[in-house]
Amino acid sequence: MDRLEAMSIVVQVAETGSFSRASRQLGIPLATVSRKVNELELHLGTKLLTRTTRKVALTDAGSVYLASAKRILEEVDEIERIAAGEFQQPCGELVLTAPILFGRLHILPLVIEFLALYPDIHVRLVLSDRNLDLIDDHVDMALRIGPLPDSRMVATRIGSMRTVVCASPKLLASHGTPSDPQGLDAVPCVNFDSLSAAPAWSFRSREAKALSDVAIAPRLSVSTAEAAVLAAAQGVGVTRVLHYQCAAAVRDGSLQIILADFEPEPLPVHLIHASRGALPSKTRAFLDFAAGRLRQRIALP
């Protein structure tokens, strides 16, 4: 019995919650998955998984085994990468992730430069507005905007990001420019749902510096920042987005930032990577290459 293979299969079954899903993801027959798990349980003399017609669950012994198995498999993977020279010479696949628009505007241009400098590295850039799990999704480095609740990660701060309210000059000329957040009830609004799911925007008061929510009645709600910026630039309404999402429109004059004195504290921006073991040279090379350049690209005006 190949114990590492059986260990990998148990981990996959436990994480997917299904023998059939594990079979599809591993690309091996369902019967083989079941047989390998049975052989491992027989070898250990205990049940790791309980099977019902609807789901698979870990036994108490299985929960203990899973935690150790994942650690062992990660260590084996690291040892193999060391043997392959990945920790000495930058090489191999580098998996990066970032929010869609930020990645297209700022990460992709750096990746193109980086690839020209490191011919032995190939990059898989996953652009998603959903935060991927670095361990479970096998990601080497991620760009995160906002607080970092996960203490397992090592973070390098590269700057801050404003949350801004902006509108087209034409709309402001016809409706007037609000002097404070309460004035938003006199102008149409475009809500970016991912930033403000509820019909209320948070602002900081001049005096107390505390955040308070101001209700809005959006004429249009959209699910992407690009759509919010486009609609606002066409005069549909005032919108609220992260600064990088409207920076180009502000530069070309199609949008104007308003209520700057009431903005909440800027959000932190980090590059993060998993904290386990030594940092592969491909990851270290990208961190050293990208951190300073990103600081320059997103420096607050």
Image: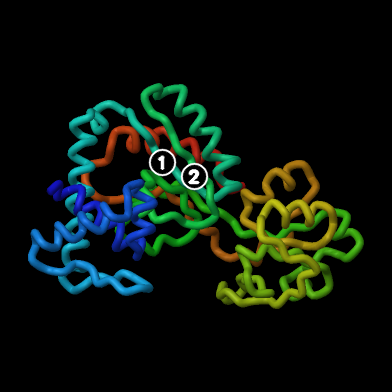
| SS for dot 1 | strand
What residue is at 51 percent from the left and 33 percent from the top? 110
Judge whether residue 206 can be spotted in this image: no
Q: Is residue 116 above or below residue 28?
A: above
What residue is at 66 percent from the left and 56 percent from the top? 224
Separation of residues labelled 1 and 2 (CA atoms): 7 Å
Residue 253 lies, in percent from the top left, at 79, 45
| Farthest-out residue, right | 174
Q: Residues within 10 Å of mark 2 (few under 14, many from 20)?
A: some
Check disc 2 and report the residue beneath it: 126
| SS for dot 2 | strand
Task: Classify residue 41 as left or right of residue 145.
Answer: left
Q: For the residue marked with disc 2, what is the amino acid?
A: Val
Q: For the residue marked with disc 1, what is the amino acid?
A: Val
Q: Is residue 118 above or below residue 72?
A: above
What residue is at 57 percent from the left and 46 percent from the top? 102
Which of 279 and 179 lies nearest the eye of the viewer? 279
N-terminal of the two: label 1 or label 2? Answer: 1
Residue 164 lies, in percent from the top left, at 66, 59
Quick check: marks 1 and 2 in contact, CB under 8 Å? yes
Check disc 1 and report the residue beneath it: 95
What residue is at 23 percent from the left and 48 percent from the top? 74
Task: Classify residue 206 as left or right of residue 149.
Answer: right
Residue 167 lies, in percent from the top left, at 78, 57
| Farthest-out residue, front | 31
